[in-house]
Amino acid sequence: MRAIIIDDERLARAELKKLLQDFPEVEVIDEAANAEEGIAKIESQHPDLIFLDIQMPGKTGFDMLSELERTPQVIFTTAYDEFALKAFEVNALDYLLKPVEPKRLADAIQKLQPGESREIKHETENVNNSILHENDQVFVKDGERCWFVKLGDIRLFESVGNYAKVFFGTNKPLILKSLNALEERLDEKFFFRANRKHIVNLRMIEKIEPYFNGGLLLELKGGEKIEVSRRQTVKFKEMMSL
Amino acid sequence: MPFMRFGNSRYWLFQVVGWGLFALIFLFVGFVFDKLDTNYYYRLFLFIGLGLLLTHFMRWVIRRANVLIKPIQEQIVNLVIITFIFGLLLGISETYSQDIFNLSLTNAKELIFKRLLDNSFHSFVYLFMWNCIYFIYHYIEKSRRQQLDALKLEALIKELELKTIKAHINPHFIFNSLNSIRALVDENPERARKAITELSNILRSSMQAEKSETVTLEKELYIVKDYLALENMRFEDRLRIEYKVDEETLNQPVPPMMLQTLVENAIKHGISRQINGGVVRVISEFKNNFHELAVQNTGRLNGKVNGEGFGISSTNDRLSLLYGNKAKFEIRQATPTLVEAKVSIPSETILR
């Protein structure tokens, strides 16, 4: 696994690197001292894993994650931060407290899912205009709560002004992204623009019913009912009849 | 008069409702005994008008004489006396105005003395009821307020205690320092040893700080220097430290851990947010009979500084506890890139 360490303190990075020497499966390919540097390095080197400090100058680790198009696997590191700890407790994200106990580090690394066929994906991908796949995860932050969500688990994106509401599980937080920008990034094999305001996950459709004016009404697994506009209905039928 | 603060509107509400009920009862009584005639109405509303006027005047007297803050026995005596005097006043004014408006039931002038006595007696009874309501209302209001004040005070004390303890050493700092020290054990064992000494000095003094009211600046500076040395180990070239300390001020007593709190905030809100770091400058000097202690750091003040962090409020609390309003504390944007937190303590008071 290729990893990047992001922490504003050189000694903290050095210490973590030293601890990671005992884990041959983790290869530290680079380091970053702040969020900006972190984003640049993640987007150019596509690590499988990042070790991320929460409190950094400029942007926090959380801010950094919500700016990433797709997040690699993340292990948070923090010395002591009540706010961050609360966020972790709510969402059971994995985190390490500095100074890091080697045993905890081993557990955290063990828990990571092996980077599933990422290598292959990288070859076929155009780096600049990468399409997000259903196994890619995004980091969603809504006030104090935050989540890592696999795209495949998202049922629906709904446009709310400049924001998009993301429906997954029982949550529907807002993210600062327009529906059009999202549509460009999403894999159209799985995500379908039903109308001006909604993008649905095709795998999450439970029922399809005819609707007025030759449109369709989709019922999703969460119970949401989404109308497919007439123009999109033609496209939808084409896709489904394959 | 602190517990008369209730809005006048509530007083008038009580007046209107009270006298309104009074009118209703007498209209009802008049109806039942079939005594309702114009004369009855006029006398009733004359009495209510006079009653309103006199009770309002009575309230003014009660407030003027500060009856409500006297001990309870005295209050009761006052209540009886005031009720008696005003009962008499109301009785007399009722009798005479009945005569003026020709509303008296009997025309016999000889009976005036008996009528005065009658009228004064029932006036006394009604005013006594009025006063009972008035005093009981204030009694309840007062004890409720006292309870509330006691609770607030308790909460404030707890908060203060908590803040002073918390303000001393920030756990984030301790764990970050330990982490850096662990990294230094291999990289620079000499510096690691020194860092452990510095950290234990700080921990020790933070535990002792609560015991004394003031310490000399010299002692406080030892801690601050250790603290900044540790932060320098963490931030490395992102942190530059400068001292501008007048030797003469070293013997000045200062509240323990106060300068330390200011320096900690300069790091927390200033340096740790700057990608390229900056400077922390500690200044101590005499200026116009004041001992001025200032901490400057690179950074910009954001709008929400006032009293938000516990550093500011706890510093303010400690200064006002020790020096009343003679000491001053301010945070300002000293230059476009420098934030300054400054404490001015009167040097006369403390040179004693």
Image (tube, rainbow, N blue to C red):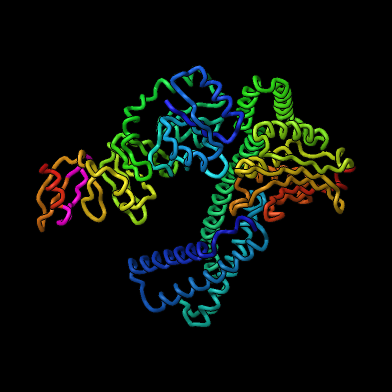
Magenta span has B253? no
Give the side of residue B320 with respect to residue A233, left or right. right
**In the rendered image, the vertical position of residue B126 relative to residue B223, given as above or below:** below
Give the side of residue B225 with respect to residue B51, left or right. right
Q: Is residue A201 visible?
A: no
**Residue B124 location, x and y as percent?**
55, 62
Magenta span has A224? yes
The residue drawn where x is 13% and y is 43% is A240
Quadrant where the C terminus of chain B is found in the figure: top right
**Residue B90 location, x and y as percent?**
56, 70
Give the side of residue A85 with respect to residue B297, left or right. left
Q: Quadrant of residue A212?
A: bottom left
| Of B40 and A178, the residue lying toward us | A178
| Of B179 and B97, the residue lying toward us | B179
| Of B48 and A221, the residue lying toward us | A221
The residue drawn where x is 41% and y is 38% is A146
Q: Quadrant of residue A132?
A: top left
The residue drawn where x is 48% and y is 41% is A40
Q: Quadrant of residue B56?
A: bottom right
**In the rendered image, the vertical position of residue A85 relative to residue A232, given as above or below:** above
- The magenta region covers A219-232
Quadrant where the N terminus of chain B is found in the figure: bottom right
Outermost residue to the front? A123
**Residue B297 location, x and y as percent?**
70, 46
The residue drawn where x is 21% and y is 51% is A194
| Of B119 and B159, the residue lying toward us | B159
**Residue B214 location, x and y as percent?**
79, 36
Q: Is residue A213 visible?
A: yes
